[in-house]
Image (cartoon, rainbow, N blue to C red):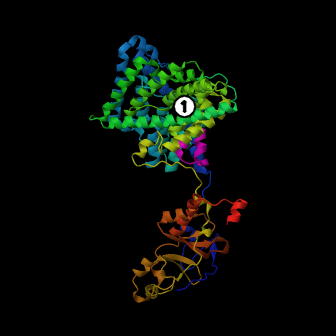
Amino acid sequence: MTEHESTQSPTTEGLTVSPSLDFVAEAAQIPPETTPINVRTLRICSLAIVLGAVAAFVALCLTSLIGCITNLSFYGKLSTSFISPAPAVQYLGLWVVFIPVAGALIVGLMARYGSKGIRGHGIPEAMEQVLTNESRIPMRLMFLKPLSAAVSIGTGGPFGAEGPIIATGGALGSVIGQFLESTATERKTLLAAGAAAGMAATFGSPVSAVLLAVELLLFEFRPRSIIPVALASSTATGMRIMLEGAEPVFQMTDIQAPGGAALISYILIGAGLGLFAVIITRAVYAIEDSFERLPIHWMWWPAIGAFAVGIVGYFAPDTLGVGYYNISDMLSNNLTVPTILFLCIMKFISWSISLGSGTSGGTLAPLFTIGGGIGAVLGTAFNAAIPGVGVDVRIAALVGMAAIFAGASRAMLTSVVFAFETTLQPLGLLPLLGGCAAAHLVSSFLMRNSIMTEKIARRGIRTPEDYEADLLEQVHVSSIMTKDVVTLQSNNKIADVQEWLATRSNHTSHQGFPVVDDHGVTVGVLTQRDVLTADASSDRTLDKIINRPPLFVYDDCTVRQATDHMVNHEVGRLPVIQRSKNGELVGIITRSDILSVFYRRVNDTQLQQPIWRSGAQDRLR
């Protein structure tokens, strides 16, 4: 029972064939090395293009529905024009308080008797389905989410339409994936493609929509997922241009390139917005916790939150509805500082209470309004404190708008590119990048979870935060396998092997042993349990208790392939065959060998001594 030097054996198509067993070793089904693009990816890309066109149409229908409900609720007329409720407050008076309440009662009924999944702003719910439910979103949410959001926003809810549209597009992609034969990864890609298409169709921002999908839904950066998402996003944007034109959503006059002092100021403004993002996130969830403690059914909570919306709307009509024009006014520096402060405070009160009550609506537009206002105020303060700093209040508002979303959602690249795509101001990219990076830094340092992940984190769901290369894909089996292989002969008697194991001598501590025949061909693997529990009567040999074809892995395979092979066949070890030498047994790989790969990750986090040392340090040594 010593180490066996295997010999070369006959092969079929380069794969070892056992002369004693009538099968080809290829039946072991070694997982193929992953390829960036395959035929199924092309199929998903085709579906993504169709999905992008449909999502653009859905986005148009939702905005029209919001306009219809707004016109009916506040103006008593039938029209689909996207209009603000603010002018109606002048003649409705105190009646404006009850319109949001009526809408919230409808949303509460839809949530209780339709689907509880319509509650919230959509993106965290989509993330939860990706992480826990193989991207399977119930079909009813595809209809109930946009309808509930249209009722909520159309009756004065201080939300943006983009969140529900993103959620609806994601649900549409998920449902398509469920109706077709697909993997969980493909459904995730379709869900992200639908969500990105919804955002792109709303704002005409295809690149930031793709980045949003990567940062908040896909949790990966691979061609197989990014390409379909990009195709869906570009298709939806193309449809939007055909239907509504190519004008930017937020009109902004041309800006000038910032100087060095101004750039530093914008970065500091971004850091301040990161702090505000932390405060706002904690406030929203504190309000949500307060609603959780109410002694009434959650169905009534949206109506309570809507009552606050109505009261705030009575005193500050511009807080009602989506309010994209508020953002445009800030970016054009059309509002005074007192007006901006009043609007931001009232918008925050209205939005945070309403969102905390569990109604249906988005977070992007409210955050952009609040962040843009704070940025404009801070820019004005910089100019007053340091007159020569050269801060452009419009750029400060732009940085504030993007930075608060970067800090609250941790989607930094999305925030930078979104602000550019919705204003088409390329000279704002540098201050946007610095400001959003600073906001992301401050927020990540002060707060563990974001406004998108806090809700699902409380349910015990951990959201991936890092995007790094798969270590198992970077290491070959040959570099971690055990080369000193102890083998057993297939014609060894079971009783003899049992007696050898009982001696507990050298080499008997292994849990599994490759079994080879007289030609040195691996015919299987037996564990100690297999041998010790086998019937040793009648001089039976080891080949009589091998009950499955030999599973193996080639030495030039990646550790990822070996790991997948173990999982697929529920084994804990694999013989390693050298492909270049006609199937020679050269090693064995076990679970503990695979774990050794992760030592590299641990070592990467350890402090190391600097390579360069001063002469004084060398003398001290």
Q: Residue at x 46, y 25 (%)?
A: 345
550 versus 381 height, above or below: below
The answer to if 230 sits in the magenta stretch is: yes
Question: Considering the image in quadrants, where does the C terminus appear?
Answer: bottom right
Q: Quadrant of residue 519?
A: bottom right
Q: Can residue 502 be seen in the rendering of this structure?
A: yes
Q: Which residue is identified by label 1?
A: 56
Q: Can residue 232 be seen in the rendering of this structure?
A: no
29 versus 301 height, above or below: below
Q: Is residue 423 left or right of residue 507?
A: right
> Residue 485 versus residue 619: which sits nearer the camera?
619
Three-letter code for the amino acid on which mark 1 is drawn: Ala
The answer to if 180 sits in the magenta stretch is: no
| SS for dot 1 | helix
Q: Is residue 466 left or right of residue 495?
A: right
Q: Residue at x 55, y 66 (%)?
A: 596
> Residue 602 versus residue 470: which sits nearer the camera?
602
**Number of other residues with Cα within 10 Å of mark 1, as a class: few under 14, some 14 to 19, many 20 or more:** many
Q: Quadrant of residue 435?
A: top right
Q: Quadrant of residue 606?
A: bottom right
Percent from the top left, x then y, of residue 145? 42, 33
> Residue 593 versus residue 500: which sits nearer the camera?
593
Percent from the top left, x then y, of residue 343? 48, 22
Image: magenta residue range? 215-232
Percent from the top left, x then y, of residue 95? 35, 15
Q: Residue furthest left?
A: 295
Q: Is residue 122 left or right of residue 45?
A: left
Percent from the top left, x then y, of residue 141? 41, 37
* Prevalent SS, magenta region: helix
503 versus 90 height, above or below: below
